[in-house]
Image: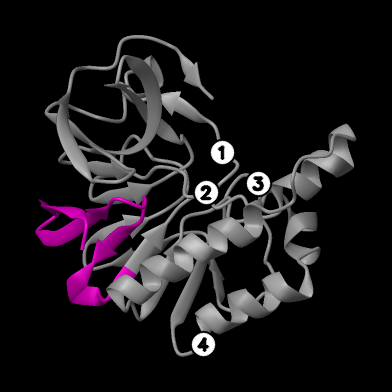
Amino acid sequence: MNAHAFTFAGHDLQALACGALFWPEQELLCVSDLHLGKSGRIARRAGLLVPPYETLDTLARLDAALAETRARTVVCLGDSFDDLAAAGGLSEEESLWIARLQAGRRWIWIEGNHDPGPVDVGGQHRESLSLGGIVFRHIADETASGEISGHYHPKARIALRGRSLARPCFLVSAQRIILPAFGTYTGGLDCRDAAFAPLLKPPVFAVLTGTRATPFKLKQPTKTTPLR
């Protein structure tokens, strides 16, 4: 398995290269910000047509992560759907795929700012989830500790063959983990952005996703630079 193993809140976790977080002891896979149905939302609200394949691509990568880890519990950390209309507008193929992934598993949808209401696609809908001293929620709470969240779509820049590329990344401190966005059509925020400063007390490390899960020490966030 291509992953970076580390200990958080007394538990052994794995940051997978695909952008999912695996908790072996609980047989739990956690993903954030799937933003399923984003192309449809863009078409409805902006009248722009973009290739409508991101939902199937995201589900295919989630399917692969579940096959690799054999997780029995799945926690989706909010913004699983780009809006509530997207949750109700899934194609038959997409709905059946989600149902197949849910079969035989405990599946928990954590509410996000894009999908705050219940979604009628199976599983449980929760504001947050507490398990083994760890709290799962969509947006980080500065006062919390032992927290896993998403929302910010953290990314880091790397140099590859003379080019600067942005990669989604995990951000990890003693208090919290912020997951990268798992969805295909998602932008991101530079991991050195000042928005992360009140949430991540040093020492902090990041784990780049992509072909390999690559950890590196992160300096204190100091700037504001959205990455697309």
Residue denoted by label 2: 33
Q: Quadrant of residue 87?
A: bottom right
For the residues carrying marks 2 and 1, which lies nearer the camera in this image?
A: 1
Of callouts 4 and 2, the N-terminal one: 2
The reply to whether the C-beta atoms of the residues labelled 2 and 1 are less than 8 Å apart is: yes
Gap in angstroms between the C-alphas marked 3 and 1: 13 Å
The reply to whether the C-beta atoms of the residues labelled 4 and 3 are less than 8 Å apart is: no
Gap in angstroms between the C-alphas marked 2 and 3: 9 Å
Residue denoted by label 1: 186
Amino acid identity at mark 4: Ala
Residue denoted by label 3: 114
Amino acid identity at mark 1: Thr
Gap in angstroms between the C-alphas marked 2 and 1: 8 Å
Q: Is residue 120 visible?
A: no
Q: Position of residue 154 (x, y in %)?
A: 40, 32
Q: Quadrant of residue 23?
A: bottom left
Residue at 55% from the left image edge and 64% from the top image edge: 59
Of callouts 1 and 4, the N-terminal one: 4
For the residues carrying marks 4 and 3, which lies nearer the camera in this image?
A: 4
Of callouts 3 and 1, the N-terminal one: 3
Please give left or right for residue 184 compared with residue 69 in the image.
right
Circle 3 sits in a helix, a strand or a loop, which is it?
loop
Residue at 31% from the left image edge and 14% from the top image edge: 162
Please give left or right for residue 137 compared with residue 209 in the image.
right
Q: Which residues are magenta?
A: 1-28
